């Protein structure tokens, strides 16, 4: 059976989504989970974009061992050199170079002739091959490129040493028939294409990313690129979990297999959603909360008689089986550590101690502790590796009544470790908290977006607050959790400010491939 490699670009193309700004610790945590998920290649960032991106790529390359780690580079020597410095310590050094090939991009963006584009592409691949054994070359906007020119430039970069050729539908313009035909044309008209991997990279602007990716597989693609939950610029990328499950459920149709561990899908999806602050729509295929919900009486009757009547995918397949009580208020430190290890967390003794303290606090207030709760607690400790002084919430108190003006009182430690207390009013409880925190935090804050969601089910479920703001002119998103949503809101506000304070360098987001 033909093998399809999975190229995950959640940490690069996915992070280009508006409002997403992952720090290095969060990127490492996602990369570790992507390794467990079974991604063949993990695109960990754009090393030349910023010191922060370089650091993240370098640290992921030194952490991940069972997946190939790659970084993006433009077709310039400085980008490729930066990628090499970040990736030279990885198990299999791999670089991803791109250059636009469509007439509109060559004329208006690159301002180069087709001959100059070929020359640039060949030179960049030859330069990369001096360092990297694995070189992927992408024809940006391939789906709007002239097929004859595309075949010509691909022949040349293969001669120069490219080991993977990527044909992106950069703006989500192609239809499945057109995209499949493009792959068929390249496989039939490029000498040597059988000696390299042929990759598909689809965006979802017209809602056809999944269909286009499957069409590419039917027509010769041996690698597909996408993101978890389909996050990405504009309407996003193809959702890898959809492709993995589709290839599994319809194996007789597609006749291919991957190394994806399907039981890791739910956890991978939840982690990416949690750390990026991107909510998964309820009716999202495979991982949405309604994916296995059946409300229609006819559907429910069929499910009771035989689940296969309406359920082609089972929750168990993607690791979404119902979770029972895993730990309780009387559970000890040993049981807590054992559960953390079984969930894939390798915390230091100090972080495990802190996580256990937070678990005990939650267990005193919450009747049932499920795996979703532990995932949040343990993840927060795993990614908390900053030693830079930040703001820390000590207490929040809100006075509210339908006939009274909402008032919030907040005590918090400032970066200089001084505890300050302020109070302010607002039109509602949340605005009162925001107005109070503005008096504590140094710098100009403007709230762009705010939302609260529950983690798990039940009246005592944890509440997660996500805030998108501009802080001193920089857009940043933060999140935090608590059993009380107003406490979660105050913690998320400070988390957002703190993220900007510890940011290693300004992240430059470049719309590519």
Image: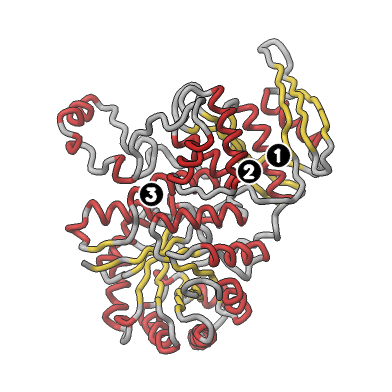
Q: Is residue 225 left or right of residue 425?
A: left
Which residue is farthest top?
403
Residue at (35, 40) in percent of width and height: 320
Residue at (59, 49) in percent of width and height: 348
Q: Which residue is mark 1?
A: 494
Q: Is residue 333 left or right of residue 281?
A: right
Give the answer, above or below, for where 214 lies relative to 315. Answer: below
Q: Which residue is mark 2?
A: 478
Q: Secondary structure at mark 3?
A: helix
Q: CA distance from mark 1 to mark 3?
A: 32 Å
Q: Nearer the viewer, residue 427 or 43?
A: 43
Please rate how many residues cluster around mark 2, counting C-alpha atoms within 10 Å: few if below 14, some from 14 to 19, many from 20: many
For residue 222, what is the image quadrant? Answer: bottom left
Is residue 14 visible to us here? yes
Residue at (72, 27) in percent of width and height: 395
Viewer-nearest of labels 1 and 3? 3
Q: Are the two marked residues, 1 and 2, in contact with CB atoms closer than 8 angstroms?
A: yes
User: Whole-percent x and y of residue 499?
Assistant: 68, 48
Q: Nearer the viewer, residue 292 or 382?
A: 382
Q: CA distance from mark 1 to mark 2?
A: 8 Å
Viewer-nearest of labels 2 and 3? 3
Tag of residue 114: none
Give the answer, above or below, for where 378 lies relative to 34. Answer: above
User: Whole-percent x and y of residue 439?
Assistant: 81, 34
User: Whole-percent x and y of residue 197?
Assistant: 35, 75
Q: Which residue is mark 3?
A: 264
């Amino acid at each position: 059976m033909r093998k399809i490699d999975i190229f995950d670009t959640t940490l690069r193309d996915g992070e280009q989504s508006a409002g997403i700004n992952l720090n290095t610790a969060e990127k490492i945590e996602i990369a570790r989970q992507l390794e467990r998920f079974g991604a063949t290649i993990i695109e960990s960032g754009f090393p030349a974009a910023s010191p922060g991106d370089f650091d993240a790529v370098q640290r992921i390359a030194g952490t991940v061992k069972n997946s190939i780690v790659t970084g993006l580079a433009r077709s310039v020597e400085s980008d490729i050199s930066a990628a090499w410095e970040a990736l030279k310590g990885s198990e299999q050094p791999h670089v991803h170079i791109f250059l636009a090939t469509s007439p509109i991009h060559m004329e208006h963006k690159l301002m180069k002739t087709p001959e100059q584009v070929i020359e640039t592409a060949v030179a960049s691949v030859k330069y990369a091959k001096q360092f990297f054994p694995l070189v992927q070359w992408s024809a940006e906007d391939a789906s709007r490129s002239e097929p004859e020119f595309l075949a010509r430039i691909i022949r040349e970069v293969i001669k120069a040493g490219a080991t993977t050729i990527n044909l992106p539908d950069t703006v989500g313009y192609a239809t499945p028939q057109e995209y499949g035909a493009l792959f068929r044309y390249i496989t039939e008209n490029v000498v040597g294409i059988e000696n390299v991997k042929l990759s598909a990279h689809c965006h979802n602007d017209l809602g056809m990313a999944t269909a286009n990716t499957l069409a590419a597989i039917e027509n010769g693609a041996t690698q597909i690129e996408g993101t978890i939950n389909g996050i990405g610029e504009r309407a996003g990328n193809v959702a890898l979990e959809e492709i993995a499950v589709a290839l599994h459920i319809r194996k007789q149709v597609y006749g291919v297999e991957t190394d994806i561990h399907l039981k890791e899908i739910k956890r991978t999806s939840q982690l990416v959603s949690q750390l990026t602050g991107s909510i998964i729509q309820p009716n999202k295929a495979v991982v949405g909360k309604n994916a296995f919900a059946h409300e229609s009486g006819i559907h429910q009757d069929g499910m009771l008689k035989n689940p296969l009547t309406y359920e082609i995918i089972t929750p168990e397949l993607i690791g979404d089986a119902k979770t029972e009580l895993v730990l309780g208020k009387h559970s000890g430190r040993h049981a807590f550590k054992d559960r953390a290890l079984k969930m894939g967390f390798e915390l230091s003794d100090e972080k495990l101690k802190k996580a256990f303290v937070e678990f005990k606090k939650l267990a005193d207030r919450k009747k049932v502790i499920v795996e979703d709760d532990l995932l949040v607690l343990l993840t927060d400790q795993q990614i908390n590796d900053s030693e830079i002084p930040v703001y820390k919430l000590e207490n929040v108190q809100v006075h509210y009544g339908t006939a009274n003006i909402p008032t919030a009182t907040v005590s918090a430690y400032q970066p200089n470790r001084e505890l300050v207390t302020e109070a302010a009013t607002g039109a509602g409880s949340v605005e009162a908290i925001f107005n109070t925190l503005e008096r504590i935090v140094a710098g100009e804050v403007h709230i762009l977006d705010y939302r609260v969601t529950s983690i798990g089910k039940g009246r005592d479920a944890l509440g997660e607050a996500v805030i998108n703001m501009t802080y001193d002119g920089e857009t940043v998103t933060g999140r935090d959790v608590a059993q009380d949503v107003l406490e979660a809101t105050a913690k998320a506000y400070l988390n957002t400010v703190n993220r900007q304070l510890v940011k290693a360098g300004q992240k430059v987001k470049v719309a590519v491939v």
